[in-house]
Image (cartoon, rainbow, N blue to C red):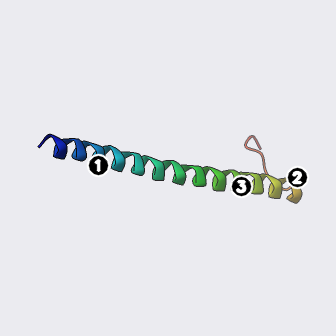
Amino acid sequence: MVVLRILGIALVIWLALTVLGAVFKFLTLALVVGAVLVVGAAAYSAVKGGRSRRSIGR
């Protein structure tokens, strides 16, 4: 009975760590994709030119 309880606790801990690892892997991928998109948008804006854009105050 004690062995089954220990195995159950170990299984729950292992599953929790597996889920956390998957979440962190996804968040890392999302961070990289987001950074690439932001840099791409900034580069596009710099190349296109700032004179054609309207400012907030105008």
What amino acid type should be assigned to the residue bearing mark 1?
Leu
Give percent across and percent down for residue 3. 18, 43
For the point 29% across and 44% down, which residue is it? 10
For the point 76% across and 57% down, which residue is it? 40
Which is more foreground, mark 3 or mark 1? Answer: 1
Q: Upstream in the sequence, badge 2 or badge 3?
A: 3
- Give SS at disc 3: helix
Which residue, as the protein is rendered here, is positioned at the far left? Answer: 1
Q: Which residue is mark 1?
A: 11
Classify the position of the C terminus by image quarter: top right
Give percent across and percent down for residue 52. 85, 56
Which is more foreground, mark 2 or mark 3? Answer: 3
Find residue 9 and report its image quarter.
Answer: top left
What amino acid type should be assigned to the residue bearing mark 2?
Arg
Q: Residues within 10 Å of mark 1 (few under 14, many from 20)?
A: few
Most foreground residue, 22 or 31: 22
Q: Upstream in the sequence, badge 2 or badge 1?
A: 1
Classify the position of the N terminus by image quarter: top left
- Give SS at disc 1: helix
What amino acid type should be assigned to the residue bearing mark 3?
Val
For the point 70% across and 56% down, which residue is it? 37
Which is more foreground, mark 2 or mark 1? Answer: 1
Q: Which mark is residue 36?
A: 3
Most foreground residue, 21 or 8: 8
Most foreground residue, 30 or 39: 30
19 vs 9, left or right, is right
Q: Upstream in the sequence, badge 3 or badge 1?
A: 1
Give percent across and percent down for residue 42. 78, 52
21 vs 43, left or right, is left
22 vs 29, left or right, is left
Q: Which residue is mark 2?
A: 51
